[in-house]
Amino acid sequence: MSAPDGFIEFIDDRSDDATRRIRASKPLGLISRTGEHPIWLGHTDGNSNDWHPRLRRSGPDTPPTVISFYTPDTAYEALASTLRASCERFGAAHRVDPRAARGSWERNCAIKAEFVRDMRHRITGPLLWVDADAALAAPLADLARLDADLAMHLLDDWRALSGTIYFGDTDAARELIDCWCARCEAEPNIWDQIHLDLA
């Protein structure tokens, strides 16, 4: 199996075929559905306009629904309004809801996994989690052409960042979200981002 120029691909460490290595010097780690083993893909220049062929949607473009939550009566409430406004400016479907605080920043972050799971059950099509203190800077046209279970930014080519996460409307994505939720529920004082990486 060979990758197009500019892409690095490998099979994860559950396979005997290769060990997990990410050599992409920049930004994008992606998992595609390719049979029994997931394939991780990195793009060396961070340009998502030309997705790897395994990740290119074959049917009509399907833009993701932006999802996020905020804790009421905190600074995040006003920031969530900015996120909503940016979604409206770029015509992105969105669902930004309040969730009660749980007493610590880590415990509040752990709400993210169950919120994503809830939205995955309620909304058809891909989802794009965006932290409430962020905003869209451009339309989501590139992501409308993406067909993946999961897409996220990897810091230093290996550490998952959970500020913006794409979840496909797939069984594999649902399985990952369930695992992420189970980890957050079992150890709510550990940052959700670490649990997502381990899941």
Image (cartoon, helix red, strand yellow):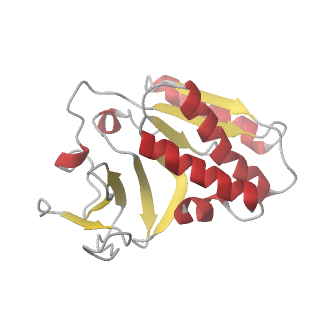
Q: Residue at x 85, y 48 (%)?
A: 102
Q: Residue at x 33, y 57 (%)?
A: 38
Q: Is residue 89 above or below residue 171?
A: above
Where is residue 65? Give x, y as percent.
Answer: 48, 29
Task: Assign the C terminus to one quadrant of the image.
Answer: bottom right
Where is residue 113? Give x, y as percent.
Answer: 63, 47
Q: Is residue 153 above or below residue 115?
A: below
Q: Residue 17 occupies which quadrant of the picture?
A: bottom left
Number of numbered labels in the structure image: 0
Q: Residue 152 occupies which quadrant of the picture?
A: bottom left
Q: Residue at x 69, y 30 (%)?
A: 97
Q: Is residue 135 above or below residue 14?
A: above
Q: Residue furthest right?
A: 103
User: Does 22 sit left or right of 118 as displayed?
Assistant: left
Task: Assign the N terminus to one quadrant of the image.
Answer: bottom left
Q: Answer yes or no: is residue 44 visible.
A: yes
Q: Residue at x 22, y 41 (%)?
A: 56
User: Does 71 sit left or right of 123 as displayed?
Assistant: right
The residue closer to the viewer here, 147 or 6, is 147
Q: Answer yes or no: is residue 167 visible.
A: no
Where is residue 153? Give x, y as percent.
Answer: 43, 58
User: Does 163 sit left or right of 190 as displayed?
Assistant: left
Where is residue 119? Give x, y as percent.
Answer: 59, 32
Q: Residue 78 occupies which quadrant of the picture?
A: top right
